Image (tube, rainbow, N blue to C red):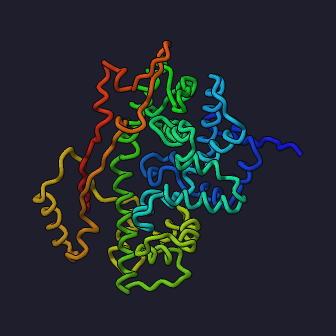
Amino acid sequence: MQFKNTLFNDPIYGFITIETELILQLINHRYFQRLRRIFQMGLSNLVYPGAHHTRFEHAIGAMHVMQMAIRSIKQKGINISDEENEAMQIAILLHDIGHGPFSHASEKVLLKGISHEIISLEVFKKLNQDFNGKLDLAIKIFTNKYKRKFMYQLVSGQIDVDRLDYLKRDSFFTGVTEGSINTDRIIAMMSVENENLVFEKKGLYSIEKFLLARRLMYWQVYLHKTSLVAELVLIKIFKRFRSLVLEKKEIITTSHILYHLIHANSNVHMTDSVLTQYLSLEDSDILHLLKNWINHKDNVLSTLSKQIIYRDLPKIKIQNKPFDNQVILQKVNLLKDRDIKEDVHDYFIFSGSISNQTYVSDHSQILLKSKSGKLKSLTETIDYFDISQFSKPIYRYYLCYPK
């Protein structure tokens, strides 16, 4: 019986086609369906009210962009088998499947030291067992172990289909037009040389716009000071609860949704039970905890939870150089006047740094192909564009303190 294509109606691209039965089965799997309940942009909806789109939508959209890229590359005479086609789509479809609730906030505390990329690979392997090894090739592409390197570069590279979707999608849902990019043009310029992804030189201006859009979106949206302080407070909340549990000031049983994760931080390897527990957590679970913790007997946990739920966040200052210790001390002295104990000061006053690097010039360079077939890196091609401003990390320093 021939597989009947399934369609998703997407606000960005219109109708998206699911091309194979295996891909549809993966989308219908409970691990993937969970992404419907994980916000793509974490707590950014506290700043941009429309940013309620999910990891599910992004993953489907990125798969669609991969379909477009495959068609464009095949039109240039590059052979891609049906098996490779399906595996490339699966690799990008599942690239974010390891994200936890509110993404990076939970990643930094609940599974300390284990990135969502590592978790995604573990989930990939579990799904491969469920599907009797049918994801073997997709895993090779996802881990950059397949001989055709351009396939990995489309999943994770300087200009990959992940970025092409999330910039366009996040720009749409936040209303920040600076993130809008010409995805069709960039994809049309894609080609392959010596199994590496390259771009026709006439697509240079669209690539410049992509780099600029990515830089602006990071400073204006992804690292917006209100989104940043909300995420930092959420991290502090997780740390406080874990501290209370480990100090025996809070008793949680195995039935508590954070039990395995609180006790997993001392483990070097992630066990199946910890992974299963992690994959059961969604944004709504964390919000439910925060609502309950508003009335918690611990004043720190209660106060921090109120800050998120009531959107009554601390003040945050961001500048180009680290904050002077004297400035931080002045803020700490204000806490003493409020009778806040010294051993919990760092939950209310804290500083650190953020960084953004738009283009990593020494790794996976963007290669441009001239009409004569000569390849040059982007940095060699642009003589009027200060690429150093995009390739060097830019640091900003923050200080958070009570109003």
Residue 173 at least partly seen: no
Depth order, front residue of 279/391: 391
The quadrant in which the C terminus is found is: bottom left
User: Where residue 306 sits: x, y (%)?
Assistant: 39, 67
- The residue depicted at 37 percent of the width and 82 percent of the height is 246
209 left or right, relative to 66: left
User: Where residue 185 sits: x, y (%)?
Assistant: 54, 23
The image quadrant that residue 399 belongs to is bottom left
Depth order, front residue of 276/251: 276
Depth order, front residue of 261/270: 270
The image quadrant that residue 81 belongs to is top right
User: Where residue 210 sits: x, y (%)?
Assistant: 44, 30
Q: In the picture shown, does residue 337 fall above or below 324? A: below
311 left or right, relative to 133: left
Q: In the picture shown, does residue 201 fall above or below 320? A: above
18 left or right, relative to 248: right
Residue 5 at least partly seen: yes
Q: In the picture shown, does residue 11 fall above or below 247? A: above
- The residue depicted at 38 percent of the width and 64 percent of the height is 235
